[in-house]
Image: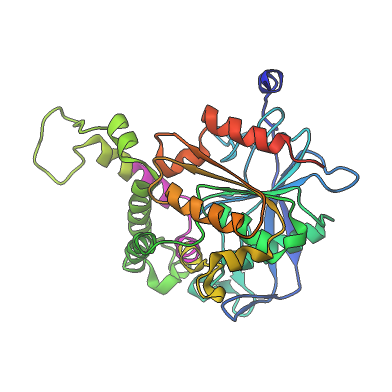
C-alpha cells in the first residue's frame, strides 16, 4: 500500500522565505500590545482554486518557518521536517498547500527581541512583550487571512507545535478541519517547567546577558545559551538512545582525571550547546520556554480539560512515542481522553521508537505510515 507514492517521494526543491507585514496592533494575552510586526513564512505546493487544501505546520521551540526544501547555494540547508513534507511524502505537496511560519518573538526574521523597537530605535531586547501560544495562533490566523485561507485542511505540529495545533482548534474552531498533535501535552508538568527554569537561569546569570540588552553591548550570552541547550537536549533523548549512541565511551580510552571532555556524551552535549549558541537568540529562548510553561487551555475551566476542549469541532490525530519522557504518552492520552469525552473524532497512535522526544522529527517507518494513512484520508 502506498508503495508507488513512496517511491515517487522527492524534495520540494529550492525555496525562499517570504515576509508579511502587519500594521494593525496585536493585543497579547499578557495584556501588552505589539504595535506592528512582520511574520516570515514559507509555502510549498499550490493553493487550489477552492482554497481548501492549505495545511499549517507549527514549529517547536527551536524550529522555524523553514519546514522543507533547501536554500539556493547553501549546503545542509534542508528544512527541519523535510522528511515529512514534499511530493510523495506523508504530507504530500502535490495535494496540499503547506505553510510554515516563524513565530512572533522568534529569531528567524519574524518580529522578535532582536528586531528594532520603533519606540526607541534600538533592539527590543528584554522589552519585547511576553507572547503565548494563543498569541502565535492569533498572528497565524491573520497571515491566513492575508493569504485568503478561511479554513485549514489541517494544522500540524510536534511538541510546542502540537500545542499550537490544539490551540487552533479551540481559538478558531470553524477554521480547522483536522489537527495533528504529535509528541505534545495539554500543559507542562512541574518537572518540565523545572527543566525550563534551569535553562533560563543559565542564560539570565550569564555575565554577557546584560539584562537582555546584550545587542547594544555587541556580545552574546553564549555560555548561558549553550548550557541551556545542553540541559534541554538531554531531555529530548531517551536513556536507551544515549546509551546506544555513546555509552560510557572515553575519548582517551582511559580516565585522565580532569574536568575537560572525557566521555563522548560530554563532547556531544558541548558540541550541540556551542552550535546552538552560534545561531539562536537567547531572548527568544527565554520567551519561548515561558510560552511553553504558560500554556494550559483548561486553566479557565477550573482544570477541566474535557470542558476546555468542548469548543472544538475538528477531527484529531494524536501521536506519542514510547520512549518520550519529556512529553510522555500518558500526556497524549490525557488529550485523547478529553477529546473522546467531548464527542470529538480522534485517532491515537503510540509509536515504539527508541529516540525519545526527538522521534517526532525522524523518518521512522511506523510513524510516517501512521501520518500518511491519516493525511491520505483528509478530504479537500
Magenta span: chief secondary structure: helix
Q: Quadrant of the N terminus?
A: top right
Q: Percent position (x, y) of residue 326? A: 40, 51
Would you say 163 lies left or right of 353 here?
A: right
Please name the residue shown 49% across and 66% down the image: 287
Total marks in image: 0
Please name the residue shown 60% across and 56% down the image: 339
Which range is magenta? Answer: 271-288
Would you say 69 lies left or right of 24 here?
A: left
Q: Percent position (x, y) of residue 62? A: 50, 52
367 vs 251, nearest the viewer: 367
Please name the residue shown 84% across and 56% down the image: 148
48 vs 260, nearest the viewer: 48
Q: Quadrant of the C terminus?
A: top right
Q: How is the image coloured?
A: rainbow
Please name the residue shown 41% across and 52% down the image: 277
132 vs 2, nearest the viewer: 2
Q: Is residue 287 magenta?
A: yes
Work out whether residue 83 can be spotted: no
Q: Quadrant of residue 167?
A: bottom right
Residue 231 in the image: above or below residue 94: below
Q: Percent position (x, y) of residue 265? A: 27, 38
Q: Is residue 170 magenta?
A: no
Q: Percent position (x, y) of residue 321? A: 46, 41
Work out whether residue 245 can be spotted: yes
Q: Quadrant of residue 312?
A: bottom right
Would you say 172 lies left or right of 294 here?
A: right
Amino acid at each position: 500500500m502506498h508503495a508507488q507514492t513512496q517511491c515517487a517521494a522527492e524534495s520540494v526543491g529550492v525555496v525562499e522565505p517570504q515576509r508579511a507585514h502587519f500594521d494593525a496592533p496585536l493585543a497579547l494575552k499578557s495584556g501588552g500590545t505589539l504595535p506592528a510586526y512582520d511574520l516570515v513564512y514559507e509555502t510549498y505546493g499550490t493553493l487550489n482554486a477552492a482554497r481548501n487544501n492549505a495545511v499549517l505546520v507549527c514549529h517547536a521551540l527551536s524550529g522555524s518557518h523553514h519546514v522543507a526544501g533547501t536554500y539556493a547555494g547553501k549546503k545542509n540547508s534542508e528544512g527541519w521536517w523535510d522528511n515529512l513534507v514534499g511530493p510523495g511524502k506523508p504530507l504530500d505537496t502535490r495535494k496540499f498547500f503547506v505553510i510554515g511560519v516563524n513565530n512572533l518573538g522568534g529569531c528567524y526574521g519574524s518580529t522578535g527581541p532582536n528586531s528594532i523597537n520603533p519606540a526607541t530605535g534600538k533592539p527590543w531586547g528584554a522589552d519585547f512583550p511576553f507572547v503565548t501560544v494563543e498569541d502565535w495562533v492569533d498572528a497565524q490566523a491573520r497571515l491566513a487571512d492575508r493569504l485568503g485561507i478561511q479554513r485549514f485542511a489541517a494544522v500540524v505540529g510536534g511538541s510546542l507545535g502540537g500545542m499550537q495545533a490544539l490551540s487552533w482548534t479551540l481559538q478558531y474552531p470553524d477554521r480547522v478541519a483536522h489537527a495533528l498533535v504529535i509528541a505534545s501535552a495539554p500543559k507542562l508538568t512541574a518537572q518540565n517547567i523545572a527543566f525550563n527554569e534551569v535553562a533560563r537561569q543559565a542564560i539570565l546569570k550569564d555575565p554577557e546577558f546584560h539584562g537582555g540588552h546584550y545587542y547594544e553591548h555587541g556580545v552574546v550570552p553564549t555560555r548561558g545559551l549553550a548550557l541551556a541547550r545542553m540541559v534541554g537536549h538531554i531531555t529530548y533523548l531517551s536513556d536507551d538512545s544515549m546509551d546506544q549512541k555513546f555509552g560510557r565511551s572515553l575519548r582517551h580510552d582511559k580516565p585522565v582525571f580532569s574536568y575537560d571532555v572525557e566521555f563522548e556524551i560530554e563532547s556531544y552535549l558541548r558540541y550541540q550547546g556551542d552550535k546552538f549558541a552560534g545561531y539562536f537568540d537567547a531572548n527568544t529562548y527565554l520567551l519561548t520556554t515561558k510560552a511553553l510553561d504558560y500554556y494550559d487551555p483548561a486553566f479557565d475551566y477550573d482544570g477541566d480539560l474535557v470542558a476546555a476542549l468542548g469548543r472544538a469541532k475538528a477531527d484529531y490525530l494524536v501521536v506519542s512515542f514510547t520512549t518520550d519522557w519529556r512529553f510522555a504518552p500518558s500526556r497524549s492520552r490525557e488529550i485523547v481522553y478529553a477529546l473522546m469525552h467531548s464527542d470529538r473524532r480522534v485517532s491515537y497512535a503510540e509509536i515504539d521508537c527508541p529516540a525519545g522526544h526527538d522521534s517526532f522529527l525522524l523518518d521512522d517507518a511506523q510513524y510516517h505510515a501512521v501520518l500518511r494513512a491519516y493525511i491520505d484520508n483528509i478530504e479537500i
